Amino acid sequence: MMPGLKVNKERNYKAENSRKVTIFMSLGMALLMSLGMSTVMTLVNIGMSAFPWMWLRAWCIGFLVALPLSLVLPGFLRRIAKRIGIADDRIVREDPAGRRTH
């Protein structure tokens, strides 16, 4: 086995794992943000009268809007941040001694 082949397998695994983490984080953020926002907005707008059904409807709509946005917007915003110079493409790692390396 060639040493370079092992590196490529590791890189592919890391990329696949990174995609899974990104999807999980987007799903979690969409779920929690839509839950919180729909709860607050439903309470503000109608109070406790008919709260459960109105909230459930508002949450479903909010989640359906939030999920695709949470999957698309981070990449779009990352490209904008790189373009205007506030994001860095370099990977920062810590070695076993705790020093940061690039």
Image (tube, rainbow, N blue to C red):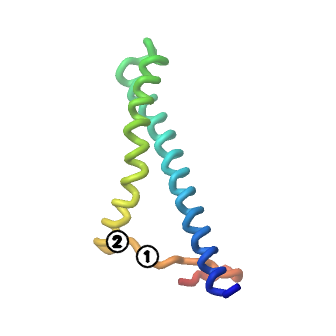
Which amino acid type corresponds to the residue marked 2 in the rendered image? Lys
Residue 87 in the image, given as x and y percentages of width and height: 39, 71
Q: Real-space Cα distance between discs 1 and 2?
A: 8 Å
- Left or right: 74 as drawn, with respect to 52: left
- Which residue is at 50% across, 39% downward? 31
Q: Quadrant of the N terminus?
A: bottom right
Residue drawn 46% across the image and 40% down it: 33
Q: Nearer the viewer, residue 17 or 3?
A: 3
Whether the residues at callouts 1 and 2 have beta carbons within 8 Å, the answer is yes
Q: Position of residue 81 (x, y in %)?
A: 34, 67
User: Quick check: 57 left or right of 80?
Assistant: right
* Between 101 and 3, the one nearer to me in the picture: 3
Residue 82 badge: 2
How dense is the environment of label 2, judged by Cα within 10 Å: few (below 14), some, or many (20 and up)?
A: few
- Name the quadrant containing residue 86: bottom left
Q: How many marks?
A: 2
20, above or below 57, in the image: below
Q: Nearer the viewer, residue 35 or 41?
A: 35
Q: Quadrant of residue 7?
A: bottom right
**Vertical order, 93 against 70 (above or below):** below
Residue holding disc 1: 89
